[in-house]
Amino acid sequence: ESRDEENIPLNPFTAGVYVATMMAQIDVLLEAGHPYSEVVNESVIEAVDSLCPYMHYRGVAFMVDNCSFTAKTGSRKWAPRFDYILDQLAYTAVDNGKPVNEDIISAFQNHRVHAAVTACCELRPTVDISVGAASSTKEIVIE
């Protein structure tokens, strides 16, 4: 069954938090000296091609359960800490009516990674992920 992309609800605040976390990861990887191809793959392409379809289809827990051991362990370790920081800083700022920092918006719009994302996306094949099949050892029945 295909989805109607135009009718998928999108919360602008949630989308903003998602993109901000993606950009934070991009900045951390670039500052650590990772090549652009790795930064784009780890931060953007894997999210768009794998993680987002899994989250949309079965939720975050399913996505985490079907990641690599390292990703699973990391997400379970860092998610509560990250959630706490968002609750204490980002969400309270919005709740208290703090205005949007236009410098951050401008930095995003002019970030050097956008050209790398464009170049990497032109080089990769189209992908159609299947999320309907059993995909973890917990779901696969061995006959």
Image (cartoon, rainbow, N blue to C red):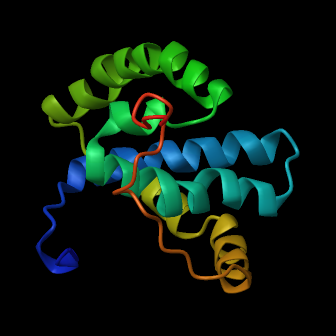
Residue under the image location 61 percent in, 52 percent down: 43
Residue 12, position in %: x, y?
Answer: 21, 56
Residue 13, position in %: x, y?
Answer: 23, 48
* One can see residue 100 in this view: no
33 or 73: nearer the viewer: 73
Residue under the image location 46 percent in, 50 percent down: 51
Q: Quadrant of the N terminus?
A: bottom left
79 or 27: nearer the viewer: 79
Residue 72, position in %: x, y?
Answer: 55, 26
Quarter location, residue 121: bottom right
Q: Where 87 sits versus 121, above or below?
A: above
Residue 40, position in %: x, y?
Answer: 68, 60
Image-based side of 95 in relation to 56, left or right: left
How many marks do you count on the picture?
0
Q: Where 39 sits versus 2, above or below?
A: above
128 or 137: nearer the viewer: 137
Q: Where 47 sits versus 121, above or below?
A: above
Image-based side of 116 in relation to 8, left or right: right
Residue under the image location 59 percent in, 69 percent down: 110
Image-based side of 113 in relation to 18, left or right: right
* One can see residue 130 in this view: yes
Q: Where 81 sits versus 20, above or below?
A: above
Residue under the image location 37 percent in, 36 percent down: 62
Image-based side of 10 in relation to 60, left or right: left
Q: Residue furthest front?
A: 143
